[in-house]
């Protein structure tokens, strides 16, 4: 695949700051969909900091994820294959890596990216990606190491975790987000492949959040369904998901939230509980029935969402918590990147995870197109990738003004 042209752009990106007050979907539509009640979307609160948005890199094509090392270097990937590093001095450079077996069809390709918590010592990182192996396609988590100059990456465990199903025809609902839990476990959010039986099937890794040892890829012994000769169930942490597009750890707590696409309504944010069933069961008449509720109230013990979009959906693709006094009134917010909505939505959650307020960040509302990833870096800044395609995408750096 030919390399994608990338350039460094200095200076703030100028865009209109729009404050949009939008109402949530009607209560009737929400009740029919089986959703939870949520506060209406409002304008940003009075006294909120204004934000500066800078373009760090452009000329990208569907960048999927971004992570920042302790030295300030940013590593991002693109769905069709390829790593890019942005060095602390602003240099933007491609990273040589082998993607000869990449399965990139529809929504699936090179997706989630995470640096090892000990990256500064071991130079190890992880991707979740579609692959072809002997003509058969699947999704795998692969472990890599990066050279000291951020110029080349090598696979060291291929796969680290295998056997995640993929929709070979159109690549629909491939997931796949990676995140490290507060206890050091590697979490993997997967999609259901648009196969009706997968979300509720503990014998399938699709439509789940998986929990593994990042050194070995093996299930951790305290996983909720771990048992001798238990197959796929050993790795499963939660199930009943449609398409997990984001995982976010709340700083200072053991709370992990998933961000999930709904069908034509009811995108969800869920507070993960070990062994929890999040209620997606699109079996219907035997086909993939997307008219059923995202969280089916008829499923005994189904865990309700802490937030849902109502109708229409916004297609949230990632989540991150803002953490730090520099964010003033924004400190502690859970941010969601919206593909369909083309904005960043802020959620204020209380200590138990109950939603108390939601609003759009005005500086990122409609000016940059589809938002794929939002991620707070080690430097405290917010990093955002767009997902518009055609080599027009950008990596943005967002900081409080002043």
Image: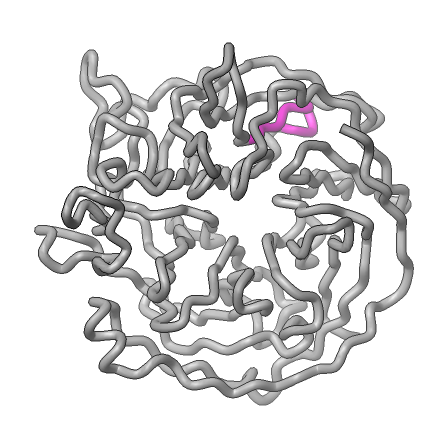
Q: Position of residue 76 (x, y in %)?
A: 70, 40
Q: Position of residue 397 (x, y in %)?
A: 74, 59
Q: Which residues are magenta?
A: 119-127
Q: Nearer the viewer, residue 49 or 244?
A: 244
Q: Is residue 307 something that shows in the picture?
A: no
Q: Nearer the viewer, residue 308 or 348?
A: 308
Q: Nearer the viewer, residue 366 or 19?
A: 366
Left or right of 55, for residue 276: left
Left or right of 262, for residue 376: right
- Quarter of the image with the C terminus is bottom right
Q: Is residue 371 something that shows in the picture?
A: yes
Instruction: Determine the image quadrant of residue 125.
Output: top right
Q: Reply yes or no: does residue 220 show up in magenta.
A: no
For image coordinates 20% across by 18% down, the residue present is 230
Q: Nearer the viewer, residue 362 or 296?
A: 296
Q: Position of residue 266 (x, y in %)?
A: 33, 65
Residue 290 lies, with reference to residue 365, above or below; the image says above
Left or right of 355, for residue 177: right
For image coordinates 86% across by 42% down, the residue present is 5
Left or right of 397, for residue 158: left
For image coordinates 82% across by 49% down, the residue present is 59
Q: Position of residue 252 (x, y in %)?
A: 46, 52
Number of labelled discs? 0
Residue 392 lies, with reference to residue 200, above or below; the image says below
How was the colour assigned to the protein in this rendering? Answer: one colour
For image coordinates 17% across by 42% down, the residue present is 286
- Quarter of the image with the N terminus is top right
Instruction: Determine the image quadrant of residue 97.
Output: top right
């Amino acid at each position: 695949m030919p390399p994608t042209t990338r350039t460094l752009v200095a200076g703030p990106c100028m865009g209109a700051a729009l404050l949009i007050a939008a109402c949530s979907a009607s209560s009737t539509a929400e009740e029919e969909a089986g959703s939870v009640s949520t506060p209406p979307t409002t304008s940003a609160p009075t006294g909120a900091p204004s934000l500066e948005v800078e373009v760090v890199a452009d000329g990208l094509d569907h960048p999927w994820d971004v992570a920042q090392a302790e030295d300030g270097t940013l590593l991002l990937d693109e769905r069709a294959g390829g790593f890019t590093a942005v060095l602390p001095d602003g240099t933007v450079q491609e990273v040589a890596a082998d993607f000869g077996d990449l399965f990139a069809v529809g929504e699936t390709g090179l997706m989630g990216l995470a640096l090892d918590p000990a990256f500064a010592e071991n130079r190890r990182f992880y991707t979740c990606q579609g692959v072809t192996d002997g003509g058969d396609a699947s999704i795998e988590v692969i472990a890599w190491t990066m050279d000291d100059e951020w110029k080349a990456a090598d696979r060291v465990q291929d796969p680290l975790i295998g056997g995640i199903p993929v929709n070979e025809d159109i690549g629909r609902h491939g997931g796949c987000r990676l995140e490290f839990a507060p206890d050091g476990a590697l979490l993997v959010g997967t999609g259901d492949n648009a196969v009706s039986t997968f979300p509720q099937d503990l014998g399938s890794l699709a439509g789940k959040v998986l929990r593994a040892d990042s050194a070995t890829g093996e299930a951790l012994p305290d996983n909720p369904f771990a048992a001798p000769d238990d197959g796929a169930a050993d790795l499963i942490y939660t199930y009943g998901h449609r398409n997990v597009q984001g995982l976010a750890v709340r700083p200072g707590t053991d709370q992990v939230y998933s961000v999930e696409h709904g069908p034509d309504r009811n995108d969800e944010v869920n507070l993960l509980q070990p062994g929890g069933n999040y209620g997606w069961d699109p079996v219907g008449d035997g086909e993939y029935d997307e008219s059923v509720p995202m969280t089916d109230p008829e499923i005994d013990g189904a865990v309700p969402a802490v937030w849902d979009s109502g109708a229409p959906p916004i297609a949230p693709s990632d989540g991150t918590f803002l953490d730090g006094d520099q964010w003033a009134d924004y400190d502690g917010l859970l941010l969601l990147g919206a593909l369909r909505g083309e904005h960043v939505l802020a959620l204020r959650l209380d200590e138990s995870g109950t939603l108390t307020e939601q609003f759009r960040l005005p500086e990122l509302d409609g000016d940059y197109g589809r938002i794929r990833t939002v991620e707070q870096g080690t430097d405290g800044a917010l990093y955002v990738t767009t997902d518009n395609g055609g080599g027009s995408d950008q990596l943005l750096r967002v900081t409080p003004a002043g």
